[in-house]
Each structure stands twice: as structure tokens, then as C-alpha cells.
Amino acid sequence: MRILEHPILGKMPPRKVVKIEMEGRVLEAFEGEPIAAALTAHGICVFRYTRVRKEPRGISCAIGQCTDCVMVVNGIPNTRTCVTRVEDGMKIQRQE
Amino acid sequence: MKKLSKSAAAKGVLKREDLGRLPGMPSEKRLKKGPVAIIECADEFPCNPCEAACPEQAIRIGEDITNLPVLDEDKCTGCGVCISACPGLAIFVVDLTYSQKEAVVRIPHEFLPIPGKGEVVKCLNREGKIITEGGVVKVINPKRNDRTPVIWVAVPREFAQDVRAIRVSDTG
Amino acid sequence: METYEFAVVGGGPAGMSGAIEAAKAGVQKIAIFDENPTLGGQLVKQTHKFFGGREHRAGKRGIDIASAMAKECHGLGIDVMKDTVVWGIFKGNTVALYNEGKAQRLTAKAILLATGASENNIACPGWTLPGVLGAGGIQTMMNVHRVLPGNRILMVGSGNVGLIVSYQLLQAGAKVVAVIDILPRIGGYGVHASKITRLSVPILTSHSLKEIIGKDRVEAAVIIKVDSKNKPIPGTEQRFDVDTVCLSVGLSPLAELAWMCGCKFLYVPELGGWMPCRSEKMETSVPGIYVAGDGGGIEEASTAMMTGAIAGIAVAESLGYLTKERSEELRKEKTKGLDPFRCKDFGFRRVANEKLIENIIGSKGVRE
């Protein structure tokens, strides 16, 4: 859910929209925001499944420290989505 | 400094016995005279913007900035500048002389939507219980408040010392 | 290879303060490296007004303190390299950087490690489910990225971070069903607690997190009451239907670079665990390597500004820009800014441990 109006941050300023693709689904995102923020705005919270026990994982620290949020981005696995910014045409996949 | 009640330490709710001991509390006598600041600050940590903000020098903390703010109720005019200056949002202004039946409580309210003049809002006590309804008399939100609007709510007099938050109707 | 007089790793309140003080004293080539796209460290998500006194910029919102300090850095001609990770420090004060796909090395006569801290976790059943975040993590999502990962939140931990983030969650439009704490007392300031209790957020002390339930994300959380020995009392479980659990259970210094440099460490539980020892001038056991802010022991932003400044003053002295006397004078001023945070109910633990840390390498540091 996006916070469009906030008592301290004010109104969300106009931002350029880019399109990213996650496993066949085209999603609108704001240029410059982290992938994790864009996915969260669309209600996506499972970012990957662990290799052995197939457990769902998502965002934990949100500042690039814990690596819980890693996904395959443009073919590169283990990309920290909370600190990697979206780019038009980016392809995101859950890694397993 | 005397220990706070169990309610304050364990639940975060100041009781009458805690408040009565605070140096930021005005006397009953002063309250009857007109609007005055009520500083509900009970822990000793470093903080003194209220002292700097008061145009009448009615709040004193001193060199040791962990001291609790002391209210000089005779100097206090109830102007309310301190309400938005307090980073802890712990200062209110109460006016028991508003009318025969009602008092006005001025509350810092950093939420959306900001209620409008004339709007009826739910009034909550320190425990977060809705205890009455109140009418918004005024909304003060100048740039100087740095995004801390102050809402003047008229409530039945008997609730003046309990109402410390509002909830705009039709929010959760 | 480029050489700086002073390299600062981390552009938060500690790092910026260090660079600013050094620049004001006349140090010439100063650089701040930060892995984020903006300067400010944790300040960029602090939407609340700060406490303290004038020297701590009390009354100003953290977000505004961040931009004011960043402006000051630029105004003083300090080189700021954003989106830059310092991934190592090698012999000869060689700083290894990574930025936009390029690796780089440079040297510096003095280095300040102001790398902050990371959030702790509670490993209970279900703790890895999507929807379990650090309190700082959710604060970043809502205040920096303007997204909410959930709407019904259980906050675990009633220190200042837990209380403040709970308030900010309400401001963002979320519901906080409760704040719990294992201890019998609320950890943070009473005013932070009152701000949320008067908005119907109950604070339940003497409660611990038992388990988090859900299939693909958090669906519920179960808490349990504990006795005076922190042992769970069977039969006192309470279930909350929530989609998010925020863990606000302490911070640990991010001290990898200090380990790499060979700094002496000490384990101080009250200050977050393993931390590099340092003198009262904030110099570690390795000459020329300084530490400040949470990276040198968990405290808060206001004290980070002071410890960073103390480090900057010490660096300026070591490089010959300040006399011993002038440096002493400036340091005394900044130490005065630390004292109010290190006394009475909230600060007493810090005082005892400061003595402990200084005893390892002596308060005067390795140079004397």
C-alpha cells in the first residue's frame, strides 16, 4: 500500500512511472525506488523460497544488511531488492 | 524524584497521583483563572525546547537539561506556543473558563485528516478510552509549528483533565 | 592512488559531525563515503522532533537535521561519495571502495568508522515469515519509500525505537494492536509511551513473543506472559490477528571494518555486544582509526553527533590543525553534550561501561 498523503511527509510528489516485470506480471513502479518497495506497493510479500525447506522469505531489515529480500534481477541472483533501484524493463524472479 | 506509579512504568499511563507531583502542573487556583499550560513530562531525560519556546519564560529547566520542566503558573498566559514545541507532545493547554458548561483542551495532533472548525470528534483519555465527544473550536497550524497542528476541542468541563487525544470520526 | 587526509566511512550523524568538525578546524582533503543514495544515515527516516538541547538540534525533525547537516558538508567542501560501499580497509590505511560497478582504492591519513548498527532478531517459531520486519526496517519502508508492508502490527519491544515507530505506524495509517516487552517496565521515555497509549495502543509489559503463525506470510502472533525470572507462564497465551510483526529488540554495532583493521574489541551487552574499544578521543587501538556513533556502541543519534564531533576534533589535532589545548577545549564542549544522555535513569548504564571501554586502551589512547 502506498502512502499518498502523510501528516509529516506531506503529499507524495509526482514521480516518473516505469514498468518492471515479475514472473510474467507487468508492474508499475516509481523511478528510483527500490524493487522491494515496488513489490510491497503491489501487495507482493513473498520474495523467494529457501532452497532446502522451501520456506517463504521477504523483507526484514530493509537497508541491505540481512539479505532476506534477495531475488533474481535481470538474471543475476542474490540481488538485494531493498537497496537495488527499479529500472524500466527490469525482470524480477523469485529465487529458490 | 519520587517513583512513578505502576501504571506509568508498566503501561505508559500517568495517573492522577503521578500528575499531581509533577512540577509542570498548574494549581487548581490557577486553572480557574484561565488558559494555562499543563506539562505532563515525568521522566528525566535530556530535553529543553519548551523552555526555549516560551515567550514569557514561564517554563524553567535550567543548566541540567534532564531536569523536569517547572511551570511558573503566574507567568504562563496559556498562549500555547509550547504545545507544538515539545518533541514528546506532552504539553497541553486547558481553559476551564471557556463557558459555563465547557472547557477547551488544546491538543497536539499530528495525524490526517486534520479536523475542521465545528467538527465533532471523539475524545480519548490517557488510556486511549473514548470518554466523550468534543467540538473543534479552532485549529492552529502555522508554519512555525513545523507540522504539529494544535486542535482546540470544547469538552464538558468535568472531562477537561482527562481528555488528552482526539479521534476524527470515520477514521479507524 | 588518491590520498585523503581524512576518510569517513558512513554519512550518518556521527560521520557527518566528524567531517564537519575536521573541516571547520582546517583539515583539507576530507571524504565521506556512504552506501546509500543520500546522506543522513538513520536520520532520513526519523520524522519525529528530536530531544536534547540546542547542540543536539532539539525540536528539529530528524529528516530536517539530515538535510541541514548534508548541506553543511557540501558547503565546507567535503567530498561526498554516495552509493559507495567501503568493503575493506587494508594495510597503510588503504580504503577499498565499490561504486557503480567499479572498484577503487585510496589511502587516508585518518579514518573514521561511523558505520552504525544492525537490528537484532528474536528467533521464535515463524520468525522468518514475510511480514516479520525490524522496527527500523518498517520505518524505512514507510518514511523513506512511502509503502506499508502491512496494516495490523504487533510491535515487540518498548524501548524508544519500538514506541516511536509504533507512533509513526499510526501516522502512516496502520493499526498497532499492541506493544509488548519482556521486562516489567517500559524501556523508553514515558512521553513516547503516552503518545500511543492515549491513542488506544496498549503496552503489555512482562510479555514475550511465543510464536508467529502463517503460511506464506504472517497471519497471527501469539504472546505469553512471563514471571519475574522471564519464564513463560503456561496458559497465559494471547493471540493477535496481525499481518505484521515488528521486532524492536535492540541493535548491534556494525563493526566488520574495525575487525578487519585489527582493532581490539570488547563485549559489552548493555551497549549492543561486540564493539571496538576506543579512547575518550574516539581512537581505536589502531592508530589513525577512529570510531563514532552506534558503530562504537549503541546509543542514539544525538550522542552520535557528539562522538562524531569528538573524533573529528581528534583527527584535526593528530594532523596538526589544532593545538593540544584548543583540541582539549573543543572536546570538553562536545563531552558536555554527551553528559546529559549518560546520567540518571536512562543513561546510567552507559557511564559504567564507558569506564570499562576506556580501561582497555587507556583514556588517552594509543598515542600517549
Image (cartoon, helix red, strand yellow):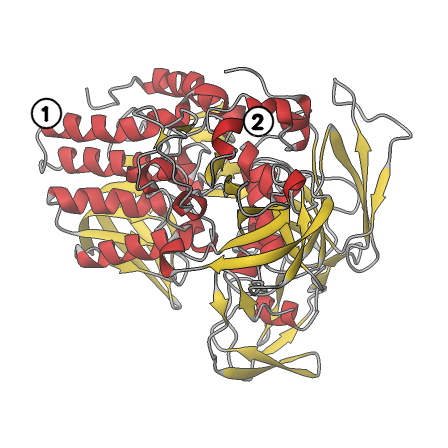
Q: On the rendered structure, is C323 left or right of C362? A: left
Relative to residue A18, is residue B157 depicted above or below?
above
Residue C351 point in image, percent of width and height: 41, 19
> Which secondary structure lies at badge 2?
helix
> Which secondary structure lies at badge 1?
helix
Residue C240 point in image, percent of width and height: 82, 47
Say which of A51 and C212 sits in front. Answer: C212
Residue drawn 52% across the image and 74% down it: A86
Instruction: Determine which residue is flagged by label 1.
Output: C325
Residue drawn 54% across the image and 25% down it: C269
What is the count of numbered marks?
A: 2
Residue C267 — which label? none
Say which of A9 and C198 sits in front. Answer: C198
Which subunit holds the residue at mark 1? C
User: Which of the 4 quarters of the picture holds residue C238?
Assistant: top right
* Amino acid type at image mark 1: Glu
Residue C156 visible, this angle: yes
User: Which of the 4 quarters of the picture holds residue C93?
Assistant: top left
Residue C256 point in image, percent of width and height: 45, 41
Which subunit holds the residue at mark 2? B
Marks 2 and 1, how far apart in space? 47 Å
Instruction: Determine which residue is flagged by label 2.
Output: B19
